[in-house]
Amino acid sequence: MATGIELMVAAALCLACPPMNHTLPEELILLDEFGSVVTDVPLDVHAENVGLDEETPMETLEVLRNKREKLRNMKAWINGRHLRIATLEDYPLSYTEVLENGTRVGHGVSFQIIEFLQEKFNFTYEVVVPQDNILGSKVDLDRSLIEMLNNSEVDIAAAFIPSLSEQRSFVFYSTTTLDEGEWIMVMRRPRESAGGSGLLAPFEFYVWILIFVSLLAVGPIIYMLIIVRNRLTGDTKQQPYSLGHCAWFVYGALMKQGSTLSPIADSTRLLFATWWIFITILTSFYTANLTAFLTLSKFTLPYNTVNDILTKNKHFVSMRGGAVEYAIRTTNESLYMLNRMILNNYAVFTETSNDTYNLQNYVERNGYVFVRDRPAINIMLYRDYLYRKSVSFNDEKVHCPFAMAKEPFLKKKRTFAYPIGSNLSELFDPELLNLVESGIIKHLSARELPSAEICPQDLGSTERQLRNGDLMMTYYIMLAGFVTSLVVFTTELLFRYINARHEANKWARHGIGRSPNGQSVKPSRWLRGLRRLHSGDKQLLGSSTHAQNVTPPPPYQSIFNHGGEHHWHQGGKGHGLVLGGNQNGGVRRMINGRDYIVFRNANGQSQLVPVRSPSAALFQYTYTE
């Protein structure tokens, strides 16, 4: 705050200042509040005095003067004039309402701009709509907005009209672009992310391919290197493992099951250790990425781009007579590649302009993808969110059953349109440019929306429980394993049957028990059982003849548990220990490092009874069960 001394000094200085000069410089061009030239520019004024270069021809001054005169005449012409303005039902950018007296009133961003122009140039207007709520094209011109402009039935089309190449021969687009329209896909929110099954998500597709190739190739490589090493070094200590053993070692290491192979050579050990280290690192990365994916993975949608719709033949719906339909049907447009989907009835163009009905009928009930411009999609999802929020307050999945793709389906510049030959563009476009550059149009388009994103693609929920869909790959692996084992089992039975038939044919050709060279041939087990089946005793196939021909020795318990009366005594030299006190005496002998008691059966044959507990238990089970 200035002090008294400072104010006194300032007043003294002002008294000493020269008086202000209110006269303007000569040859100055003045503009009014609307930007129009007020001061007439004489033709003999020097070019540098009006802001032009010395090299600028004098004809430019004449052009500026003619333009100024034309704007002045146009303002005088439109002052108090009544205009006919056509529009489309395209909420929230442009839509109409019919009052009780039958008057149609326009609303939306387009008519907020028209009201600004009306206040600027002082004109009146009436709103008309085409008979069909369509934009129109060369092959779809009847009852359209383009037809009204082409026939000069209206003075201007106040709507966000996409700039399409085919329509340029019928209308004149505004030189000022209102915005760049983006048509977005909205779909039912899937239960799980479209990034793939939970078990396959940690690695990309090509990584899985390389892992599978390495799993098939490393086994044969190790086998070949071992063979080459043994042949070059002449080493006889290192056992040359078979190809099957090497392949199973590779698979077992992948499953972390180890191996029974024990290589001796250092080079072979390095081969085995290299594969183990590779598998250890690979499984560590897989486990870490799988944990991250199942808990904190980013949600993705199954349809994000136009190529997803095309390759997966997904049904989609859009507005009848809108930019999407004409961009698909027009040859030189970017979406013409989807034209065959119209022929195959994968594309639906709805007649109704009610976005809520289209969302519920096509998307929620039938699972279609709805393509709509971004402002309409945002308003539609926001209102749906508010309604579902009142029904269920806490569950985000109930609030947001729909999801919006990130990538635009179509991009087109949007402008106002005029009849060909109209000069209203020269009057309105400078004002529209001021609105666009100041951000007013962008603000008006998003005025009804909150600042936060409504129902984003990823809801951002931190607590994620594993669903059954995350484990589907586990079920597929189990099913594939069982099916493979069943196929192998069936193959074994088939080969066994073929071998049996081969032996049967050989016996039938060369006689029972004889080969072509006269040697005896032992029949197969199946044929022996079949021969016994046709014999006189009618023994069943696969039944044992052990009980008919062999007399079993005494039970194992009777050898040692006869009241403790039996004891071992030393037999003759070389005869081992002899069990006494029983008519069924036996001699204990060491055979192949194991203890047995040798009995003499009634038919004179020797029978071995194992003394060791596990073997004795098996022996007892064989003869008593």
Image (tube, rainbow, N blue to C red):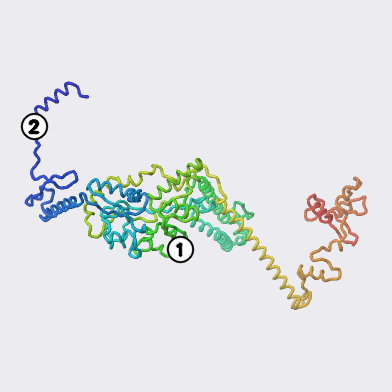
Is residue 85 visible in this depiction of the protein?
yes
Q: Crowding near pointer 2: few (<14 within 10 Å), some, many (20+)? A: few
Q: Which residue is mark 1?
A: 345
Quadrant of the frame with the C terminus: bottom right
Q: Is residue 393 left or right of residue 135?
A: right
Eye-nearest disc, 1 or 2: 1
| First along the sequence among labels 1 and 2 | 2
- Residue 395 in the image: x percent, y percent? 51, 43
- Residue 309 in the image: x percent, y percent? 44, 59
**How many numbered marks appear?**
2
Tag shown at residue 19: 2
Tag shown at residue 592: none
Q: Amino acid at mark 2?
A: Pro
Asked whether the residues under the numbered discs 1 and 2 touch, taking CB atoms below 8 Å apart as contact, a structural biologist would say: no
Is residue 236 visible in this depiction of the protein?
no
Depth check: give the residue in front, 490 or 564: 490
